Image: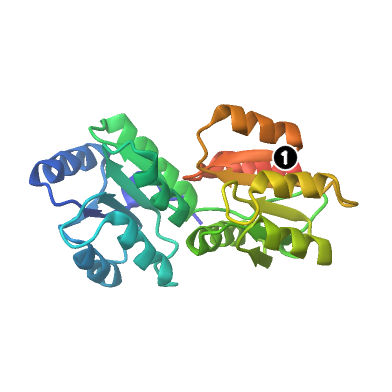
Amino acid sequence: MALLTIQDLSLLVVEPSSMQQRLISKLCEELGVPHVDFVLKGQDALDAVAQLQPDVILSALYLEDMDSDRLLRELRRTEGDAHIPFILLSSETRFDRLDPLRQAGVAAILKKPFTFDELRKVLEHALLHIQQDELVLEHFDPEHLRVLIVDDSSMARKHIRHMLTDMGMRIFQEAENGLEGMNLFTQQEFDLVVTDLNMPAMDGDELVRHIRHSERSFVPILMVTSEQNQARLAAIQQEGVSAICDKPFELGPMRQALKQMLS
């Protein structure tokens, strides 16, 4: 099957500003994107997704009837729409405002004002999500790997599971915090642990310490987090985490990290 390009994409843009609509329309025309539809409200977007079936959704943060984090959660609840890459268009920089979108599985955050090259880059990133191939591993068949996903956000767990399923993995157990994850890890065999950092009851760094001091200390651990504190992240690496990936997920680095850990 031929690989898709930006010129094959259909976009749904949720943007109440007419000025931003004109800018996006102009940049998409320059990129050669053939199908771009605009809506103003979140509910209009939900209605349009069923009708238009876009490849990618781009949305402003603040909409008249709902914020984009609610729009993303609604899309993620619908099985048929959960796979659509969702790109946030916003000048917002506050961690507490953007983190709910990171947790819900936003594919990228494109900061306003953005350029032709920045839009091209996030659309190329969306193509990776759309055309994801199964991992090819030297010693393992991905569908036989037993994966433990630990995250207090059900949306984040669903998004992680969806991404790993696209890579060929099929066997999952889930936990809502590090304590649940530790108990599952103690009771069952796992080949890979994917964990968040900041969780109630027990954080991800405590879970990492538990695993690294257990009889199965060799199990690879991928940490996915929106944590920005570099000192804390460095400390977690010292604890023995196999790799750290940011939220929103950079799919290329995530695939490469998994391939290295599982090889």
Q: Position of residue 17 (x, y in %)?
A: 12, 47
Q: Position of residue 256 (x, y in %)?
A: 64, 40
Q: Residue furthest right?
A: 215
Residue 189 seen from this side: no
| Lateral position of residue 201 relative to residue 147, left or right | left
What residue is rendered at 45% in x and 72% in y? 79
In the image shown, does 124 or 204 lie closer to the viewer?
204
The relative height of residue 148 versus residue 32 in the rendered view (above or below) is below
| Quadrant that contains the C terminus | top right
In the image shown, does 47 or 4 lie closer to the viewer?
47
| Lateral position of residue 86 relative to residue 134, left or right | left
Q: Position of residue 194 (x, y in %)?
A: 66, 52
- Residue 233's quadrant in the figure? top right
Which amino acid, by three-letter code, is at mark 1? Ser
Q: Position of residue 248 (x, y in %)?
A: 46, 45
Which residue is labeled 1 in the image? 242
Total labels drawn = 1
What residue is rendered at 26% in x and 46% in y? 33
Q: Secondary structure at mark 1?
A: loop
In the image shown, does 43 or 176 lie closer to the viewer?
176
Residue 67 seen from this side: yes
**Neighbour tally class for label 1: few under 14, some 14-19, many 20 plus, Cα within 10 Å:** many
- Residue 29's quadrant in the figure? top left
